Image: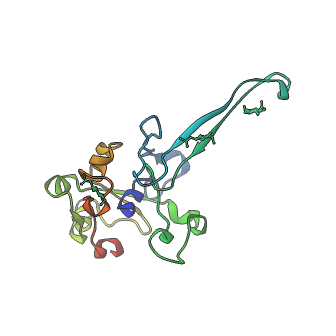
Amino acid sequence: MFLFLSLVFGIIASKRSSCSDIRVVDLSHVHGPEPFTAPFFPQYNFTIVNRSYSPFLGGNWFESNYIGTSEHSGTHIDAPSHFYRNRKRMHEIPLEKLYGPGVIIDIRRQVSRNVNYRVRVSDIRRWEASYGRKPKGAVVLFNSGWSSRYPDPFKVFNTQNTSDITSYQFPSYEFNAITF
Ligand SMILES: *[C@@H]1O[C@H](CO)[C@@H](O)[C@H](O)[C@H]1NC(C)=O
Ligand SMILES: *[C@@H]1O[C@H](CO)[C@@H](O)[C@H](O)[C@H]1NC(C)=O
Ligand SMILES: *[C@@H]1O[C@H](CO)[C@@H](O)[C@H](O)[C@H]1NC(C)=O
């Protein structure tokens, strides 16, 4: 599930792009009054700490906030250590691995027929048949349409009982598609 959510980020750029023709797309879900956090994690906490003219700062305006959140809420990336012991944590992943030419493969139709759809190599091949080979090192995003379910945890986890993790249903990937 989290692997799936983790791919919902991206920088879309053309193959040989200069800075000026890079298109940056913000795919973030809002952390707000209705934040999305898995029910068994501590919930998002935004607290105003200062919003006043401060006597400690010569009467100048001072604003600051406290933010508390569990990992794995909203749009995020999962480090390999999330599911594999002793694997890389976020700070150990080189930044260069986190951006690059972007490819979006639309799987909304497949997911609308089967919420447990697993992305297949054939989905990638079909994209390549229309658009050409995906660039080397490309960040490949699959658009499952699942984002429209946020932030309702019953819809996101597709369950009647969010406390029962075994009841969750959501699209994911076939192993071959990940390593393709
Ligand atoms: C949110 O954080 C503030 C500041 O640390 C704390 O006072 C408050 O109790 C927290 N609220 C919840 C619901 O955890
Ligand atoms: C910010 O708010 C805290 C808590 O009310 C207060 O102790 C602190 O002095 C404030 N900081 C400034 C610079 O005004
Ligand atoms: C929801 O799942 C939890 C964990 O499996 C279980 O303890 C609880 O009884 C379930 N609630 C309902 C209404 O089925």
Residue at 25% x, 60% y is: 167
Q: Is residue 94 visible?
A: yes
Q: In this view, does 15 lie above or below 125?
A: above
User: Can you say which quadrant of the picture contains the C terminus?
Assistant: bottom left
Residue closest to the eye, 91 or 163: 163
The percent coordinates of residue 156 (x first, y second) are 30, 50
How is the protein colored in the picture? rainbow
Location of residue 164 by image quarter: bottom left
Location of residue 152 by image quarter: top left
Mark count: 0
Q: In this view, does 107 lie to the left or right of 88?
A: left
The percent coordinates of residue 61 (x first, y second) are 75, 24
Residue closest to the eye, 60 or 131: 60
The percent coordinates of residue 76 (x first, y second) are 46, 54
Q: Is residue 143 above or below residue 91?
A: above
Residue at 20% x, 57% y is: 115
The percent coordinates of residue 36 (x first, y second) are 41, 45
Residue at 30% x, 75% y is: 175
User: Can you say which quadrant of the picture contains the N terminus?
Assistant: bottom left
Dividing the image into four quarters, tell me where ligand 3 lies. Answer: bottom left
* Outermost residue, left side: 113
